[in-house]
Amino acid sequence: DIGVVTINKHGHRREGWQSLPVFRQLCACIYGYMVTLQLTHFHLFQIDHFGFLEDGVFKQRYLVNDKHWHQKGGPILFYTGNEGDITWFCNNTGFMWEIAEELGAMLVFAEHRYYGESLPFGKESYSDSKHLNYLTSEQALADFAVLIQELKNSRAGAQLSPVIAVGGSYGGMLSAWMRMKYPNIVVGALAASAPIWQFPGMVPCGDFYKIVTQDFASSGFNCDVNIRRSWKAIDNVSSTGRGLQWLSDEFSLCTPLKKRNDAVGFKAWLQETWVNLAMVDYPYEASFLQPLPRWPIQVVCKYLGFNASVSDYQLLHGISQAAKVYYNYTGSASCLNTSQTATGSLGFLGWYYQACTEMVMPMCTDGVQDMFEPQEWNFQAFSDECHTLFGIRPRADWARTVYGGKDIAAHSNIIFSNGGLDPWSGGGVTHNITDSLVAIVIPDGAHHLDLRYNNDYDPPSVRAARALEVKYFKEWILQAKKAP
């Protein structure tokens, strides 16, 4: 999916217009549609919206496309940026691009502070916890609120434009919270795959990994069973130096396993691999986290249909072939890097800092109802790790305090969409709370499938979900125009 053009004729990124016609023609040939260009802008924001001692400002990036926004007071679809480069999310949110003409909407994609090019302290932003102190969801929401007001004040005809927040995953959480915290700024929100209840005491800590396991169990004979068996097989094989070398060679690891303790990190890497596959189990070829085939878990499970009689080495050969579906579907990887499991467009360090402050999301496994090794949720151990890394301690219940937890019935005009294949749906809103806090469940949908471009392989459930979302958008826009 391509929605942003910021490259020159050599394929290198730049902010400019050269070679655009050639690139558009090339993409039209390859992808079957024309690339829509949007302009990249920067706005100066307060580093701290809630105090007065730190009065510095920083440049925050946002993208705008107003190709279909011609009517005075026409709506604005505002993407609340996630933990990563905004151009990447823009490219993977085809739903907004495809409904812009129907709604006559302006599209705005706002980058989250501390990610992409929106660094409050430049190269020093991640230098220590003092500089990271302003990386919070509350500060990000305030950025978005200020930006929307500035856009409406500075663009002729936008003063009365109703604004709808749209986001997926953490961005979906932000879109929902945007409507809750700033109902004067946005008239409604689409929160896709938004785990706003994945916090202490709100949902069972094991639900996430249960859903991952269900995805594999339903995608192939003994698939989940053999992944569950693989952990013991790895322990057995990694008990000798020769076994470690075999694992390194079998999995084509860029950094060979040298000592037995290396198997702990190796297993954690595999666990994250299976989780990521569940998130992006899309019905067509896609490259959201990695380039993958359609229904990738079904492809993975073809390598794991063993019975109980296979040896550890046979089992782990199947596991290695399954892992290479995720890491080397294109065949271009010379080796597998266990230090990275997804696209480099995500800001992993920033998100880990957020998890160590207010985004405390308990998860656990028991090895029975899921296919992973048992691991309890230990808040104290997690807190100690955060303190070691950042010198700070998480506030376990802050998200409930500031955003209301499950007590959100007083709010309105929020759509919560979740896919049945998406492990994050375990912390999402999957039932209607009121007539205007509605849930849309997409049984055969993975992580925010509804926000992606239409595809010939889309299941009917996601097509119906998108149509319903547009219906609600139109109702909110009409309500806003009728408001005194």
Image: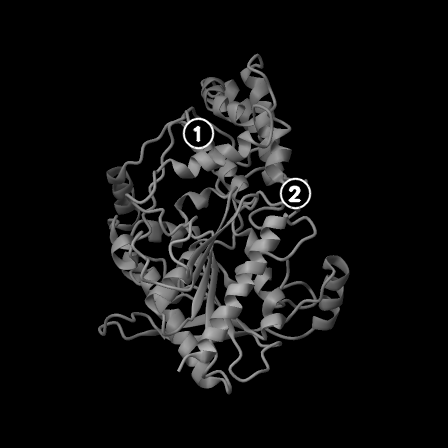
- Identity of the residue drawn at 54% across and 85% down: 72
Total numbered labels placed on residues in the image: 2
Residue 83 seen in the figure: no
Q: Point out residue 203 in the picture as x, y percentages from the top left corner.
A: 34, 42
Q: Point out residue 156 in the picture as x, y percentages from the top left corner.
A: 50, 87
Front residue of 212 and 130: 212
Task: Specify the farthest residue to the top.
Answer: 309
Three-letter amino acid code at the position of disc 1: Asp
Going from the N terminus, do you reach mark 1 or mark 2 first?
2
Q: Point out residue 239 in the picture as x, y percentages from the top left corner.
A: 45, 18
Pointer 2 residue: 294
Q: Quick check: 360 left or right of 285?
A: left
**247 w.r.t. 327: above or below:** above
Determine the secondary structure under disc 1.
loop
- Identity of the residue drawn at 65% across and 43% down: 294
Pointer 1 residue: 370
Badge 2: few (under 14), some or many (20 or more) residues near its Cα, within 10 Å? some
Task: Specify the farthest residue to the front.
Answer: 435
Q: Quick check: 316 left or right of 370?
A: right
The quadrant of the image that shows the N terminus is bottom right
- Identity of the residue drawn at 61% across and 54% down: 463
Three-letter amino acid code at the position of disc 2: Arg
